[in-house]
Amino acid sequence: MGKVQKNPTLGLIAFIVFIDMAGIGLIVPVMPTLVMDLSGEGVDRAAEIGGWLLFAYAIMQFVFSPIIGGLSDHFGRRPVLLITLAALGIDYALMAWAPSLFWLFIGRMISGVMGATWAAANSCVADVVEPAKRGSVYGILGGAGAAGFVLGPALGGALGLFGDRVPFMAASVLCVIGVAYGVYALKETLPTEKRRRFDFARANPFGTMLQMAKTPLVLGCLICIFFMQLAAQSNFAVWSYYGALKFNWSPLTIGATVALFGMLLAVIQGLLVGKAIDRFGAVRTAVWSLVFGIPSYLIIGFAGSTSIAILGLIVGSITGLTFPAMQSLMTVKISEDAQGELQGAIGSIVSLTAIFGPPVMTAVFGAYADKEGIFFPGAPYMLAATLMMAAVLILWRTLKLHVV
């Protein structure tokens, strides 16, 4: 494996995360038209098919995140990071070629399996960064990912003018660039003596969760992540429909608001996490930033204008401090040979909310978005605010009991 790098260039890891997320975002603008082209269906039926494509992606990520994390604990971060990114590049090329919906589904399932570059990158941080500084670095990685997801759709929309398949080709090229750069510059961060045997009994969502449950602080944080991410599905699933129905937003307005939120997250996570943790500590940063999610969802739900809804997004972006602070607290409770397993567990939790969240949020939206009974398009955000209250209470209780 070669000599282990003791002080790796974290900018390189952030760049790979940026490339990965930009590749995902690139295909978002053209996915609806590609699905309509391959299926021959209208936009309504294409939206249903698109939902199943998201479901397939989330299911595979839920199942395979712990496996990829366990493999990185056994073989090291570098080979897993580069192989998954290379496979993702091949997968995008497959979807660019896909002659039918069947192949598009195969491509999205492979994307779900290989969508673990984020977990491998976060494991690198735990390998080489001292605990007190991890929150700041996790924030930088999160900011890089947010920046990639903002730039990706914008670039994908422009490239889509040349054909629905072009953004997939561009995403494939981005992955190849990331792999080439990584092969040249990225060194291994996990020494051989700190690795552990790969265990199939642990390398699955349930085995991983049982392992994490042995550490109460980690278990409590994972439960908190479930509730906060489930609440976040309100924005992922219904934001565009909510704005179009309540404020008659155009696709341009929808895209601009999503881009604004992504840019706010990139700035907050990339620049402010370290300062907040240094000033207030990881515990206070995690809890108090999470609290801002409650008024954020309430503001959006009751918003009477576009400007008020945007204010809700701005308030909600402060919660971007929470996740990196929690990660820094969790990593110090997990042994050095199981950091990949921890990141796999986090990935599974997030994927689980992506499986169940959209159907729940869209069902609530549909129930209150017609003219029968109470008309209240903001209903999903009331549910989100309730879920966020639960997340705050769980996190506060967990950290109060288990942080010394």
Image (cartoon, grey):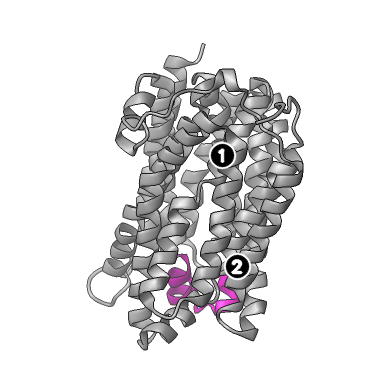
Disc 2: which residue: 26
In the image, farthest residue toward the top: 404
- Residue depicted at x 37% and y 34%: 203
Q: Magenta region: which residues?
A: 239-255
**Dot 2: element:** helix
- Of helix, strand and loop, which mostly describes the magenta segment? helix
Of 62 and 224, nearer the camera is 62
Q: Position of residue 144 (x, y in %)?
A: 68, 49
* Above or below: residue 127 compared with residue 17: above
Mark 2 is on which residue type?
Leu
Q: Are marks 1 and 2 in contact (CB under 8 Å)?
A: no
Mark 1 is on which residue type?
Ala
Q: Residues within 10 Å of mark 1 (few under 14, many from 20)?
A: many
As for residue 243 lying within the magenta part, the answer is yes
Disc 1: which residue: 120
**Dot 1: element:** helix
As for residue 252 lying within the magenta part, the answer is yes
- Residue depicted at x 68% and y 53%: 178
